[in-house]
Image: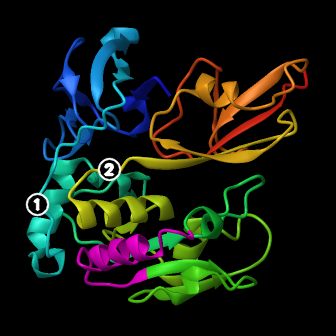
Amino acid sequence: SKTFAIKPPDFFTINPKLLVKEGSLVKIGSPLFFSKINPRISFSSPVSGKVTKINRGYKREILEIIINADNKESYLEFQTYNHESIEDKEIIELLLKSGSWPFIKQRPYGIIASPEDSPKSIFISTFSTSPLAVDYDFILKNNKNDFQIGIDILNRLTNGSVYLAIDDSFNGFFNDIRNVEKVFVNGPHPAGNTSIHIHNVDPINISEKVWTINPEDVVNIGIFFKTGKFSPKRTIALAGSSVKKPQYYKTIIGSSISNLLDHSEVNYKNNNRYISGDILSGTTVGPDNYMSYYNNSLIIIPEGN
């Protein structure tokens, strides 16, 4: 994509304080804004280039920070070598400074986790049962080592267990991952939802917190600690009955939807609905919008009106 966007409304309860302005030059990993509630939590640029536009809404709410990529892939680098010997506090600081911390969410509420908390446990669901969802075993099969590094890092953030939910009918690489408590999942939707796993395996009691993270973001954390460079990789499943050739796209967080459509065969004769995220709980978007921070799928179906 030529342009990318980071959208503060993707981060529930975050009130952003900008660190850039229109015309600012950024690298991959450069902080764009931070949370006013907790200034330690910063949000980084997924690409190197120039901030071309900052879109605002009602009461000057920041809606989008649009970056024009320069295709040079210049990185802001961090010292993560010998991460196995780094103290736990330093691991947290590296995640915060690099912009990798927003990958981690907290239950209850589904908000970005607080770095001051110690979670009861951490849950990762690798088996999504929602219609047209991505197959994590397929899209991450070449990142087994990075996923293992990410798991080892997450183990340093909790005194409890890291739970990995796996499809019990398929023997993929997740079965070989170490230092996790495996939860084997089967059955129809919502069997793959993390909320179901937490409720049945390690329920949340009063004042307790559980953290969750997307499997691809476990890989991103692993890549960061292996290379010292912020990893914004995102694999998008483009699917739906209006898509003639549903397929996966390797791209970057905040990619332009129009760019994905340019490389796809979509039935434009239909009056289509574009859904960023899960078809049951995603967000309706326009073809000129950008993919949301956490979403792995773009679903295109007839509007049906």
Task: Give the label on residue 240, or none.
Answer: none
Q: Amino acid at mark 2?
A: Pro
Q: Is residue 250 above or below residue 91?
A: above
**In the image, residue 209 lies at what x, y percent?**
34, 68
The residue indicated by pointer 1 is 79
Q: Nearer the viewer, residue 104 or 297?
A: 297
Q: Residues within 10 Å of mark 2 (few under 14, many from 20)?
A: many
Please state if 187 lies on the left or on the right of 182 as rendered.
Answer: right
Of the 4 image quadrants, the one containing the C terminus is: top right
Q: Is residue 116 visible?
A: no
Q: Earlier in the sequence, mark 2 or mark 1?
A: 1
Q: Nearer the viewer, residue 114 or 203?
A: 114
Colour pattern of the rendering: rainbow
Q: Is residue 198 visible?
A: yes
Q: Nearer the viewer, residue 255 or 154?
A: 255
Q: CA distance from mark 2 to mark 1?
A: 20 Å
**In the image, residue 258 lies at what x, y percent?**
62, 22
Instruction: Identify the secondary structure beneath mark 2.
Output: helix
Q: Is residue 169 above or below residue 71?
A: below
Q: What residue do we see at 81% from left, 30% from top?
A: 265
Instruction: Identify the secondary structure beneath mark 1.
Output: loop
The residue indicated by pointer 2 is 102
**In the image, residue 5 lies at what x, y percent?**
41, 27
Let me know if residue 209 is in the magenta part: no
Q: Amino acid at mark 1?
A: Gln
Q: Residues within 10 Å of mark 1 (few under 14, many from 20)?
A: few
Q: What residue do we see at 25% from left, 47% from top?
A: 99
Q: Which residues are magenta?
A: 141-162
Q: Is residue 74 above or below residue 115?
A: above
Q: Is residue 253 above or below residue 224?
A: above
**In the image, residue 232 lies at what x, y percent?**
38, 47
